[in-house]
Amino acid sequence: MSRGGSTGSSPRALRGTHDVLWPESARWERFVAVFADLAHSAGYGLAETPVIEDASVFRRGIGEASEVVGKEMYEFVDRDGARLALRPEGTASVVRAYLQHRPVLPWKAWYLTPAFRHERPQAGRYRQHHQVGIEALGTADPDLDVEVIWLADRFFSLLGLADYRLSINSIGDERCRPAYLVELAAYLRSRADELCDEHRGRIDTNPMRLFDCKRPECRRVTEEAPRMAEHLCADCVPHFARVLAGLDALGIEAGLDHRLVRGFDYYTRTTFEFASGAMEAAQNGLGGGGRYDRLAEVLGGPATRGIGFGIGIERVLLACDAEGCFPADPTPLDAYVIDLTDGAQARDLSIELRTAGLAVDRGFDRRSLKAQLGAADRSGARAALIVGDQELAAGVVTVRPLRGGDQRTLARDEVAGWLAALREEGP
RNA sequence: GUGGGCGUAGCUCAGCAGGUUAGAGCGCCAGGUUGUGGCCCUGGAGGUCGGGGGUUCAAGUCCCCUCGCUCACCCCA
């Protein structure tokens, strides 16, 4: 098969996108199920919102000066002339949905979504990746910050991950940050000639963005920069202290990182990130989040505080691979029906058993017994059910365990019970 | 956006210094076993050697262009 994109070859998934097929997809199903159960256990309900939004939702929410909006967002004009965008992250959409429907506060939601960013793909980085996340709106209580961070930490441990670390910071609020930004910008201007070209121009538009830069020249400057955590106001100081105390009480280790400002402009106060220690630094970010107490206002709604996080599914599965945890184990079939007559027996028996709550596949095309048994073996079914002319005439089914055990003949109405018992026995 | 590596069967790859109809293993299909999977044996299907152009008597092999994949930088999940 041609791997080229030239004439004559069949279509491929677009660059940076990928298919997740069985059996690998079994892992995704479990991943999402574990997350959903955890979210429900803390009072979070599913929020399913469109992946496509008016571009302003993200431009205003995430920030015009952010990398994601500035050079990565999929944005286009549709047939009606509207400026639309494919969601590059989950939070802005959920807050938009909150503002539109105004559920009673506090409001807690979880989500599963693809996220689109136009970048050059590499290991663990895609143009369409997938995230699960939660958002909680309507309270400034720092214990909510603790709950949210605990949920992320709990999720990782439920997957069996152990080698990861939490970084945390507070980046202040509308009361203390403006003065800090003035001081920061002044400091950065004083050392502007030492900064990388790309970030020198950001000093006045968005000085905190420079903390994200990994180039050594910028890092040297930002390491010695004034720290937000040391300029917090009388409201932010106790908030952050309460968050740290809560994490400590829960036994969650958090490393303070004064450069942790996150890539989206909507964050206030608490910001945090989880990184795997089992992967290369280029793709070790498992997830992150923080408070966004101003986001609802930026999107045109009433002041509504909020906090949440997003977790990258592909990244976390890579970390699981690196740690050898959370294996994929597809749910096995209870039975595979083999019909040696005209096919009507497989048609009717398989549907009868499925209706009774069993997982059943069957052979098609009237293939030989040997071929159908081979297919039954490959299907992973616990048992093969054989109906040939002899069984049909006698009203029975030959049942053959495929993982050890003796073959026997059962009356047709005994088969479902026998399969249920077989399921109870083993995996 | 910038740079490196790589494109031969569904998958993993071999093809020595350019030389007849391009190979292996795995997988798939069929038969050996007229109704019994896994092991074994035999056979079969499956490839415009990513695409285009060039050099040559001759190109999977050499050259150019192009597309794609991949890894890294940046940023992030």
Image: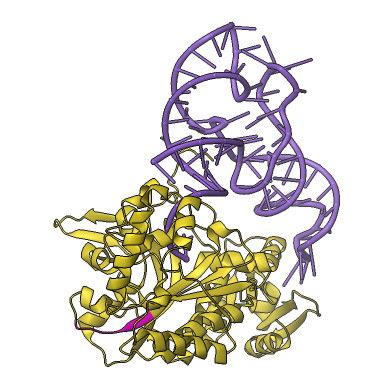
Chain colours: A yellow, B purple
Q: Nearer the viewer, residue A164 or A407?
A: A164
Q: Nearer the viewer, residue A205 or A11?
A: A205
Tell me: residue A89, above or below residue A205.
below
**Which image quarter: residue A117?**
bottom left
Q: Residue at x 27, y 69 (%)?
A: A61
Q: Is residue A345 left or right of residue A405?
A: left
Q: Residue at x 23, y 60 (%)?
A: A84
Tell me: residue A316, above or below residue B50.
below
Q: Position of residue A42 (x, y in %)?
A: 46, 91
Please identify the quadrant where the N terminus of chain A is shown: top right
Q: Position of residue A340 (x, y in %)?
A: 65, 68
Residue lying furthest left: A80
- In the image, is residue A210 part of the stretch drawn in magenta? no
Please identify the quadrant where the C terminus of chain A is shown: bottom right
Q: Nearer the viewer, residue A51 or A407?
A: A51
Q: Is residue A313 left or right of residue B22?
A: left
Tell me: residue A136, above or below residue A370.
below
Q: Main secondary structure of the magenta part?
A: loop
Q: Position of residue A393 (x, y in %)?
A: 66, 79
Q: Position of residue A414 (x, y in %)?
A: 66, 90
**Which image quarter: residue A23?**
bottom right
Residue A311 is at least partly visible in this image: no
Magenta residues (range): A302-307
Tell me: residue B23, above or below residue A22.
above
Q: Is residue A247 left or right of residue B67?
A: right
